[in-house]
Amino acid sequence: MNPTVRLQSALSDIIEGKNVKRSKHELIFEGKNVTELFVESLRKQHFIPITVGAITIEPSERVPAFIIEENTAYFGWVFWEKFSQLRLRKLFGTVIRNTKGDWLIQLPSNSTKLIYADTSQIFEMDIDRPFEL
């Protein structure tokens, strides 16, 4: 298989979660940074650059998203975290956890940092069990 076709296929698999778990992915292929190609692939698959605050979801919903830091893409979700019946916060959290069990990367709804989210894919979730994302 042509290396370019193989790379594009691999990037699509990461974005779709096919044949590979969506988690943390270094965007280096044969020694070359392929971040721009990954972003192009994200856009082709309806992932748009957006802030957490600009995503409209209900507390029982979540949207798939990636954040890119340096040469690495991290998969996560935009969702509402419930602290109590009266206290919620919308955030992006990676599926990768830190040593405390929290999301390795978290962005609150007031963050100006861009993520790539597919806002057309809204999934139901149990707001009382966000760790089971």
Image (tube, rainbow, N blue to C red):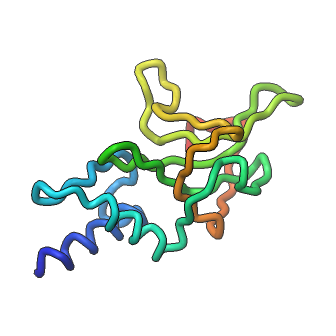
* Total numbered labels placed on residues in the image: 0
Of the pair 31 and 26, the residue shown nearer to us: 31
Q: Quadrant of the N terminus?
A: bottom left
Residue 19 position in % (x across, y down): 30, 64
Of the pair 66 and 124, the residue shown nearer to us: 66
**Relative to 24, residue 13 above or below:** below
Residue 10 position in % (x across, y down): 26, 67
- Tell me which corner region of the image, top left, top right, bottom left or bottom right, holds residue 118: bottom right
The outermost residue toward the right is 86
**Relative to 75, residue 38 above or below:** below
Residue at the image position 22 percent from the left and 56 percent from the top: 33
With 107 as the anchor, is 38 left or right in this view?
left
Residue at the image position 65 percent from the left and 70 percent from the top: 120
Residue at the image position 22 percent from the left and 70 percent from the top: 7
- Tell me which corner region of the image, top left, top right, bottom left or bottom right, holds residue 70: top left
Residue 2 position in % (x across, y down): 12, 81
With 87 as the anchor, is 15 left or right in this view?
left
With 88 as the anchor, is 41 left or right in this view?
left
